[in-house]
Amino acid sequence: DFIEDQVTEAILERDQRVDGRKLDEIRPLSAEVGVIPRTHGSGLFSRGETQVLSFCTLGAPGDDLLVETMENDGKKKYFHHYNFLPFSVGEVKPIRGAGRREIGHGALAEKALLPVLPSQGEFPYTIRVVSEVMGSNGSSSMASTCGSTLALMDAGVPIRRPVAGMAMGLASDGKRWKVLTDLQDMEDGKGGMDFKFTSTSEGITAIQMDSKTAGLTMDIIKATFPQMRKAINEVLEVITKTIPEPRKELSIHAPRIISLTIDPEKIGDVIGPGGKMIRGMCEDFDVQIDVEDDGTVMITSEDMTNAHLAEKKIRSIVRTLEVGDIFEDAEVVKIMPFGAFVKLTEKIDGLLHVSELEWGHVDKVTDKVSVGDKIRVKVIAIDRGKVEVSMKALMPRPEGYQDRPRKPQRRSGPPKNRQSSSRRGPPNRGPPRSRRD
């Protein structure tokens, strides 16, 4: 108490702070980005003895955080974790689970960045930022806000504007008061407030205040805001000198996302019975696939070749065929005497009649194609779901060539338009004749 009284008295009487700063002066600032190259984004922010190292990790849309509370349920596409390590204040003790401090400070720094984050349509990634407090002498949550901004911009997240944070303090004896910029631990005693602001160059994004007095007067609040704005601008200047805008390209270690839109009625075809189809694609191509109710499909992978293969298969599954469609690599899956069946999409095969193999006469189908061949065909007819394709339709037509009528295929059993014997009447034996005695 004696030390706190002396600190407050020196400020009120002589405008003298314990470290020799002016009342509106900030401790020395520094900022760095890309300090941990293997991460998707990283930033180191220092303000005096307070130092925070923040990391940004980009994940697939399906990596979002499920939140279930008493008030509401939902999913978070952006979340921030704050870790206050014991060595940051010179203590040696075991590291346990998150406490009230970690949860509260993490939530404040998270809320500070929410207004400037891109929409899911602009940037579909799930974003996680972790802030590790390396040293603390006041206002580590505001340093975490600045570190988060640096890490996000280094990761290539297109935030609208950089966000900086500042803690404002108060020295007061009940009658006199002085507002302090960049509060440190020794000044956070009997002063009366720890007023935290996060802001862009355009406006405030979050506010939190701890008050140790019966309340603050409007004069105190009015004096705090312009002093805070001056300090925020100084911090923003340091951040923008370090990294003026978000990087144009993502880290080479970050996953890439391909997005496409399908007919919502065909979502079931992509997922398959019991999820068999979508699980198979994820395993075969080493990708993560997320499907939204509106038909948006997002494929996430660190290997773009695999992502494009998965995209090609999904487009094949949901494709609607039309006469005139051309397939560059239709696979021959079955040979019959009258032609071959070729795989057009994951769910549709087409008949390639022997007369459609080429313009000349073909004796055997196997003279031209074999099972497993990849051939170029064109859809020439669609009748009640049955598809016919042609190879010769994509070849130049010989001069003077005349089409030959296609031989009808033999059918087993009676024709469909014929009545069955069970429905016939008695045989017609002609007009009745008179009987001779």
Image (cartoon, helix red, strand yellow):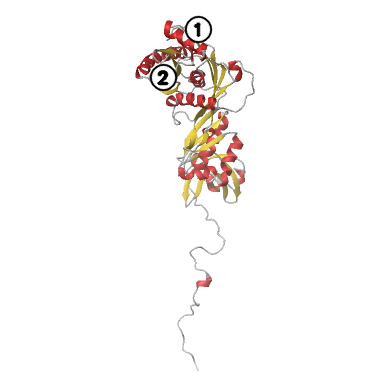
- Residue 269 place in picture, x, y as percent: 52, 45
**Residue toward you, 334 or 315:** 315
Q: Which mark is residue 19?
A: 1
- Residue 206 place in picture, x, y as percent: 43, 24
Q: Which element carries disc 1, helix, strand or loop?
A: loop
Residue 364 can be seen in this image: no
- Residue 27 place in picture, x, y as percent: 49, 10
- Residue 15 place in picture, x, y as percent: 43, 7
Q: Which mark is residue 40?
A: none
The reply to whether dot 1 and dot 2 touch (C-beta < 8 Å) is no
Residue at the image position 48 percent from the left and 37 percent from the top: 74
Q: Amino acid at mark 1?
A: Asp
Residue 177 quadrant: top left
Q: Which element carries disc 2, helix, strand or loop?
A: loop
Residue at the image position 55 percent from the left and 16 percent from the top: 136
Residue 250 can be seen in this image: yes
Tell me the residue that label 2 is attached to.
Answer: 200
Q: Amino acid at mark 2?
A: Thr
**Residue toward you, 309 or 16:** 16
Figure check: 82 above or below 184: below
Task: Bin the neighbour count of mark 2 within 10 Å (Cα to Cα): few under 14, some 14-19, many 20 and up.
Answer: many
Residue at the image position 59 percent from the left and 35 percent from the top: 285
Q: CA distance from mark 1 to mark 2?
A: 28 Å
**Residue toward you, 62 or 256:** 62
**Residue toward you, 122 or 425:** 122
